[in-house]
């Protein structure tokens, strides 16, 4: 048996992509061949195969793991591949959160919510990376569900700190850090209000650092 994993996009530094790669590493450690596939592999990721290879490489006794967080026409084709299939659900951002911000993302979110229930019969097991996501799978019609948290490869964190970053923030007592997409639905405005309170009541020199992409801005 071989284990094949698919997600439409795999990118460096992305939590979902890191989960795919950590799971592949774990499966290989267990002695099984395992491969990652995507429609698009962003620069900086290695050892990712084109999703088209799935249609000729997957055998009936193989396991196909589909990571699901957005709609994808490719998934409708993948469920026709004769193999054992598992869906890992990473949640879909509600489409209305992208209203007036990112119509492209909103369209794929709507597609994903429609697909989630429609493709349920094609999977032997639905895995939620949280209990919230597991319940969503059960409500969508997945008969067998379980919860498996996202895997972390701690070796990626075994790196020395960046000297320039250390120098920039040296001497500060309080640095409040947010890591994630900069978008209205992430409510960074609440963090700014929290910072105002923190400076007024705890540390007037506190700094708030937002680390993330700016691709979802009001249009």
Image: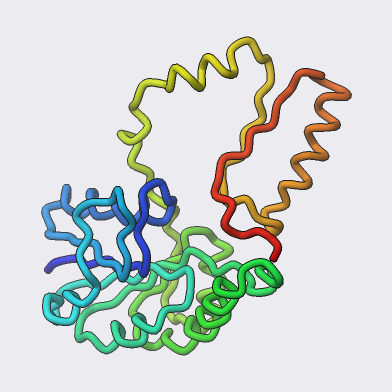
Please name whichever residue, 196 or 165, is drawn nearer the observer in this view of the structure: 165
Q: In the displayed structure, would residue 107 be above or below residue 12? A: below
Q: In the displayed structure, would residue 212 be above or below residue 119? A: above
The quadrant where residue 126 appears: bottom left
Query: Residue drawn at (81%, 19%), measured in percent from left and top?
Result: 204
Query: Residue drawn at (48%, 63%), measured in percent from left and top?
Result: 90
Q: How many marks?
A: 0
> In which quadrant is the N terminus drawn?
bottom left
Please name whichever residue, 137 or 8, is drawn nearer the observer in this view of the structure: 8
109 relative to 52 in the view: left or right: right
44 relative to 102 in the view: left or right: left
Q: In the displayed structure, would residue 1 be above or below residue 75? A: above
Give coordinates of residue 66: x percent, y percent: 34, 71
Q: Kindly give the residue lying farthest to the front in the view shown.
A: 219
> In which quadrant is the C terminus drawn?
bottom right
The quadrant where residue 104 appears: bottom right
Give coordinates of residue 61: x percent, y percent: 14, 77
Colour scheme of the picture = rainbow
Give coordinates of residue 92: x percent, y percent: 55, 69
Query: Residue drawn at (21%, 77%), measured in percent from left and top?
Result: 52
Q: Kindly give the residue lying farthest to the top in the view shown.
A: 171
113 relative to 37 in the view: left or right: right
């Amino acid at each position: 048996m071989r284990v094949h994993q698919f997600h439409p996009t795999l990118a460096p530094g992305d939590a979902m992509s890191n989960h795919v790669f950590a799971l592949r590493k774990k499966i290989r450690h267990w002695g099984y061949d395992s491969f990652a596939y995507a429609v698009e592999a962003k620069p900086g990721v290695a050892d990712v195969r084109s999703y088209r290879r799935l249609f000729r490489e997957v055998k009936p006794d193989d396991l196909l793991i589909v990571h699901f967080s957005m709609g994808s026409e490719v998934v409708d084709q993948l469920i026709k591949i004769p193999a054992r299939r598992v869906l890992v659900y990473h949640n879909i951002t509600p489409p209305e959160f992208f209203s007036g911000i990112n119509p492209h993302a909103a369209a794929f979110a709507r597609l994903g919510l429609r697909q989630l229930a429609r493709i349920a019969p094609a999977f032997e097991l639905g895995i939620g990376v949280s209990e919230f996501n597991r319940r969503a799978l059960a409500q969508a019609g997945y008969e067998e569900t379980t919860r498996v948290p996202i895997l972390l490869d701690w070796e990626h964190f075994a790196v020395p700190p960046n000297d320039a970053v250390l120098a920039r923030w040296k001497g500060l007592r309080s640095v409040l850090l947010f890591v994630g997409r900069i978008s209205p639905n992430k409510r960074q405005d609440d963090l700014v209000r929290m910072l105002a309170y923190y400076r007024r009541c705890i540390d007037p020199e506190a700094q708030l650092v937002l680390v993330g992409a700016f691709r979802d801005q009001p249009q």
